[in-house]
Image (spheres, helix red, strand yellow):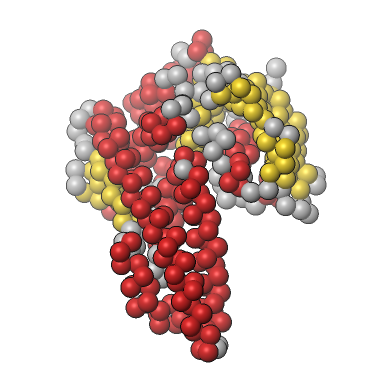
Amino acid sequence: MIIKSLVLSDFRNIENINIEFGQGLNIIYGDNAQGKTNILESIYAATTTKSHKNSKDKEMITIGRDESHVRIIFNKNGLDRKVDMHLKKSKSKAMAIDGIPVHKSSDVFGIAQLILFSPEDLNMIKNGPAERRRFIDMELSQINRIYLYNLSKYNKILVQRNNLLKQISNDMNILDTLDVWDEQLVQVGAEIIKNRRKFISELDEIIKPIHSRLTGGKEELQIEYNPNVIEEDFSDKLKRGRSSDIYNKTTLIGPQRDDVTFYINKNDVRKYGSQGQQRSTALSLKLSEIELFKKKTGDNPILLLDDVLSELDRSRQNYLIESIGDIQTIITCTGLEEFVENKKADGRIYKINSGKIDD
């Protein structure tokens, strides 16, 4: 699968852009704050319905404008697919696939498999568990529609249960109604835990040889899934923790509190790894995603690299570029570094200035 073209209007600082992408390496370069990241954000938002920067819809609309439009044409196996995203300040976003309106995020998820690598991802290893859970959810949702359905359902049940916990603190007569929500939470949550465990196990197998090659065989990387509760104990622990949940007015047990640990040579990278090791781990993780997507979908994902080259040393830069192979890659950078210059014959280059592509 590849992106053939992108049309933007009134998206952040971009008034109007029409880009046709090549099948291989596509380089978008320019000074900071010119709109490079905005292009990648528009692609990500239109194919996942959410900004990778966790921005609200109205924040992606150009200041002073009421609407924004993103149109992407994909091609898979010779067939074109069109995705339209229409953002409005006063209304919910409108999405359409091949001109037909869709009303659920799940209808858009999976139409294209994207892997985004940004400077924020380099900090995912050392930051809090919420970012690692988000990584799992975003990747699994693109390759497993049942997981996406269960995750959405679980989050809705969780909201209902938490609202009920707040009400119970003022009215204990409705305590028994918790049983209904607990049963649903356990049923759906168990499926999420099972899928996350399988995903991390598969990723662990893939990442080991990748990280070994990246570090010249000096480091062995391992990923471990740390569920807050295992499926078999979920129901029992939820009941035993009910008084704490009521006191805290929130659900303290469940996959919403899962985490993942990365080990290099059996040492926790988050606690004991150097900055270089943490960045190598993040890079290995992204490269592993590519291989897992290929395995699960039988197709290459589309790779978006948002100004990460400047954050990596030369050896990691080279390893990343060499690993891309035949994958369509859209990369942003502030300048045409030497190794990128050597790739000119392999891809297209665009210079962006004040939200406009220079001819």
- Say which of 236 and 22 sits in front: 236
Q: Position of residue 202 (x, y in %)?
A: 31, 40
Q: Position of residue 195 (x, y in %)?
A: 38, 49
Q: From where the camera sits, is residue 14 visible?
A: no
- Say which of 80 and 350 sits in front: 80
Looking at the rendered image, the quarter that the C terminus falls into is top right
The quadrant where residue 23 appears: top right
Residue at horizontal 54 percent and vertical 38 percent from the top: 110
Q: Position of residue 119 (x, y in %)?
A: 47, 40
Q: From where the camera sits, is residue 97 visible?
A: yes
Q: Is residue 351 left or right of residue 8?
A: left
Residue at horizontal 41 percent and vertical 70 percent from the top: 252
Q: Residue furthest top?
A: 345
Relative to 314, residue 184 above or below: below
Relative to 66, residue 250 above or below: below
- Say which of 183 and 170 sits in front: 183
So how many labels did they put on this image? 0
The quadrant where residue 41 appears: top right
Q: Is residue 261 left or right of residue 164?
A: left
Residue at horizontal 42 percent and vertical 47 percent from the top: 136
Residue at horizontal 49 percent and vertical 60 percent from the top: 154
